Image (cartoon, rainbow, N blue to C red):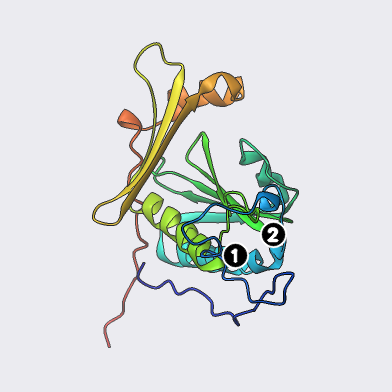
Amino acid sequence: MSGYQRPSFLDEIYLDGNGEPIAYGHRWGKGSPAEDSYSVTSNLHRFAPLHDVADALIAWLDSTFDVVAEESLDFAADLIHQPAPATRAVRVIPHNPAAAPLTFVFTQFPGVAIHAGVLHDFHFPSCGCDACDEGFDSVAEELEWTVRTVVSGGYSETFDRWPGKWLEYKLYEEEVGMRSGRGRIGGLPAERVKLARTSLPNEGHWLPWTTKIIERTQP
């Protein structure tokens, strides 16, 4: 990600009920989460810097790639599933229609949701409850990796060949990692599915984003 740098933040210390520091991301060790940690969300302020990370990513995309970046809260409707009330939304569209667009949605949770391509959303954090024990650093890294993988051409969305009732996605970066998933299209908006069947690129594989051509003058 040449040219991108994550904003720096002060490390905040969060304490449990006994006054001990909470090591988010390692809280439960190799054991199971505490029974009373499920569906409980505490110290959510630790995710607030994700908004700054998203802003830095948007600025990097806008300055590096041949895109149009626009902000409007109306763009939050790009999400298939709205996880929490949105406070801002920024849509970044490559001029190459075979490259996947990205919409960044800032939520009150606080968190960031990204709509990528036509039919998939990615949420950061993915849950945020105490049992899941997501720490800021790991969530920020996942957010950055997802954006990097999309713009580098490692993202695909495909329908199963027959009977065409499943939708699959894959994020893949060689020698780094892979993430994939699939689900039935029955729960998706019909108009979105219809659009996807005609607008997905060849074999569902989105192309890399084109970088800007920077004119240089001779000294």
**Which amino acid type is marked by label 2?**
Pro
- Residues under numbered marks 2 and 1 in contact, where contact means CB atoms less than 8 Å apart: yes
* Furthest-left residue in this view: 175
Question: Residue 7 at x, y = what percent?
Answer: 53, 76
Image position of 13 with respect to 69: above or below = below
Q: Which residue is mark 2?
A: 110
Q: Is residue 93 above or below residue 200?
A: below
Q: Classify mark 2: helix, strand or loop.
A: loop
Quarter of the image holding residue 3? bottom left
Q: 10 Å neighbourhood of mark 1: few (<14), some, or many (≥20)? A: many
Question: Visible in this render: residue 158?
Answer: yes
| Residue in view at x 33 percent, y 53 percent | 152
Residue at x 37%, y 53% (from the top left corner): 149
Closest to the observer, 106 or 45? 45
| Among the 4 quarters of the image, the one containing residue 110 | bottom right
- Regarding residue 90, the answer to whether it shows in the image is no
Front-most of residues 187 and 200: 187
Which numbered disc covers residue 92?
A: none
Q: Position of residue 127 (x, y in %)?
A: 61, 49
Residue bearing the label numbered 1: 50
